[in-house]
Structures are given as structure tokens and as C-alpha cells.
Amino acid sequence: MRIERKVNKMNIDPSTTKYLVKARLVADGIVEKPDVVGAIFGQTEGLLGDELDLRDLQKSGRIGRIEVEVGSKQGKSEGEVLIPSSLDQVETVILASALETIDRVGPCKAKINIESIEDVRITKRARIIDRARELLGDLMKQSKTTGIDLTESVRQSVQVEEVIYYGKDRLPAGPNVPDSDSIIVVEGRSDVLNLLKSGIKNAIAVEGTNIPKTISDLSRERIVTAFVDGDRGGELILRELLQVAEVDFVTRAPRGQEVEELTQKQIMKCLRNKIPGEQFGEMFGLGGETAQANNVVAHTAEKTERIERMEAVNAPREEREERRPMKKLSPSQQKYKTMLTELSSTLNAKLLNDKGAVVREVPSKELANVLKDAPKDTVAVVFDGVITQRILDLATERKIGTVVGTKMSNVTKQPSSVEIWTKDDLN
């Protein structure tokens, strides 16, 4: 407020000043500050009696220094008069009223109007409250920050102590990696630390684009989830992982973000949205023949049998070709073709019963988990995705006779009890 700035500039005793008289001056001519002050003292002298004589009141300190700001424009003067007072309320308003009797300033006609009489103590209290609020806010913020820093420092120190170095390559890892049935493969030590913050203790870092043998060896006996950054570096690491290790699931940080900077909520969301490794490689064009050969994703209970599966004799191409239908489609094949076309680009899957009705529709990425508990009357699966070894194994277990997908990966063992159709087969 302007009045506050004026009060701050005045040479008055803040312990005695109680009120501030604010008046407006208008003069028909050019006047200056000494003219205004002289008019105030001269024209109020003897008007209010000896007890309220301005000169005596100012000498005793009951009236402070009279402040005047005046300016001239087009032959007229306007200004503001401020008088600090330590008198009581009645005396102060009498003195203020006396100012309005002034009709000349210097040689010019003038008029003074009282605009307000303010209690300076109220203004000071308001300023005290505002400043106290600011100080309290700073103090609370400082206390809160200190508490967070302390908590975070303790947590981080514990997390650093929890990080171990696993295998001959001494890779940074969470404390549960040696004994866990499943592991999460991340890029660096900072990613392991960030997952520890979220309570995930089975992460291990590859520490660079050259995938260590420790990771390859672990992938043969553990369920592996690759969790990489959402940038070009993450894609390169994922490409190599799919070639040299058996990756069961894949998930990535949001585009342009790194695993080490994700919040707990983001981390959990990424892990929930993981995709089977082989399907991910087919969908996004990662890996190659080596990746397809190495990424044979079996059911969790059959993980230890992977090596035997890899050594199984592939069915001759001629036998596979014999399974392919003629271009003239049967009614059921035509129905599968229509349904597959409808599912195109939806990344969804439909489970059908023996009457051809849809018993359930789910995202293709959740198909493997859904098939474990598929309804007993499910006889066929049609989905917008890649037919993998795991899907076929689960179909065999659940006695599902038909699997229809967009295309088929490099499956090592095609079950004879399952009829397999791809988009190319039905065209």
C-alpha cells in the first residue's frame, strides 16, 4: 500500500504514532511544499485552542512531521498531505477536520479534503501477520525438506548397502537375485537402485551394451523380464538381449524416459504391461534368427526343459506345408478369417466355445496368463498377435484344438493336437 510506504519513510516514533491522517489538496495555481505546510500551521493557529495548537503538539512529539507531495499541471496543483498523530481518536479527528477549513495556500485558492484516518497499529498488525505467514511457510518448508532429506538419505544408504555384485562379472543386483525364480534385467546400477526404492529386489544390471555371460547363463534357468529405457540405447540393449539370452518378457520405460527416473507407480505400470519376449521381438522387428532360436518361451513350470526343447527335431517343412489348407476355405476357416480381420490392429484376443461363440475377449499381451485358467468349453483362440511356442504349449494343456494368429514365430515343436492358422493361411 502507498500509505505503508509513506509511513516507512517518515521520521516518526513507531511506538507512539497511532493514527495517520490522509488528506487531498487541490489549489488553483502553482504551489510548493513549504506553501502547503505554512498554510496548515498559519490557518489553524488559534483555531483549536492552546491544547491542540499544531506547533506545540509537534514540539511535544504528539504530532509527527507533516509530509506533503504536490505537483503542478496546466496551472493547477494537486497533492497529498499525511499527518501522523499520537493523540487520541477524538483529538485526531478534530485536528483532521480543522484542515478542511484551509481555503488558501500561498496566493492561490485551495481546498483540502480528508480522505481517511487510518489506525497505524492495524496496518502494522496486518503487515506482521503477512510477514509471519511468509516466515512460517518458509520454516515449514525447511522442516519438511529436512525431514524428507533425512528419510531419503537413510533409505538410500540402506539401498546402497542392499546392492550386491553377482556372478563372475560382478554385476550390480538386488539382494534377492541369487535365490529368486525370476529376475528383472535392467541397464545400469542406478536402475537397480530405483527399483529397490519401489521394493523390487530381484533386478540385475547388464552394465553396458555388451551383454555379460552371467546374464545369458541366468536366463536359461530363471524367468527373465527385460526392463530397458525408452530411448535408442534401450532398444540396442534389448536387441542384443533377445539375441544372446532367453528373454521371457519385455517392458520399456515410456518414450524418452529412463528406468532410473521413473516413479514407483510408473515402474509398476510398466511391469504390469510386459509382453512375452518372442512376441515383442516379432511385433517390433527386434532380434533376428538368433533371437528367434534363443527366445523359446516355455511355460513357467517347464522352464528347466528348455534345452531339451531346443534339441528337439524340427518337423520337416513338407509336413508343415501339408497342414496348410487349400485356398478354398471351409465355413469355420472363413469365420476365423473374418474374426482375425476384425481384430486387426486391436492387439486383442478372443476365446471361442464349440458353438463358435466368444466366451472371453482379452488383450493379446495377457493371452498366455488367461489361457492358464481358460473356460473349459474353450475350443479355439483367435488373436491379433504372433503365435509363440508358449501359446501352443498352453493350448495343448487346455485341450484347445485351434489357434489362429497374425503370424507364427520360429516354433520348435508344433503340437499335433492343435490346428494352427495364420493370416497368410487364410488368404
Image: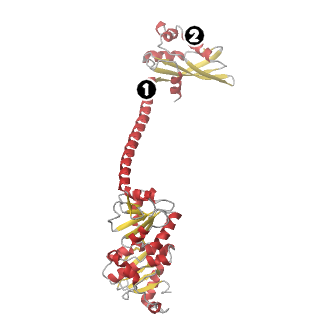
**Residue 234 percent across, percent down from the top left:** 49, 64
In the rendered structure, which amino acid carries the disc numbered 2? Gly
Query: As drawn, is 86 to the left or to the right of 371?
Result: right
How many numbered marks have been drawn onto this rendered protein structure? 2
Q: Is residue 280 visible?
A: no
In the image, 196 versus 397, the foreground residue is: 196
Query: Mark 2 or 1 closer to N-term?
Result: 2
Query: Which quadrant holds residue 358?
Result: bottom left
Q: Secondary structure at mark 2?
A: helix
Query: Which quadrant holds residue 104?
Result: top right
In the image, 250 versus 82, the foreground residue is: 250
Q: Which mark is residue 42?
A: 2
Asked if 413 appears above or below 346 in the picture, the reply is: below
The outermost residue toward the front is: 168
The outermost residue toward the right is: 74
Asked if 150 appears above or below 365 in the picture, the reply is: above
Q: CA distance from mark 2 to mark 1?
A: 32 Å
**Residue 341 percent across, percent down from the top left:** 48, 80
Answer yes or no: do the residues labelled 2 and 1 have beta carbons within 8 Å? no
The residue lying at 35 percent from left, 73 percent from top is 369
Q: Which mark is residue 122?
A: 1
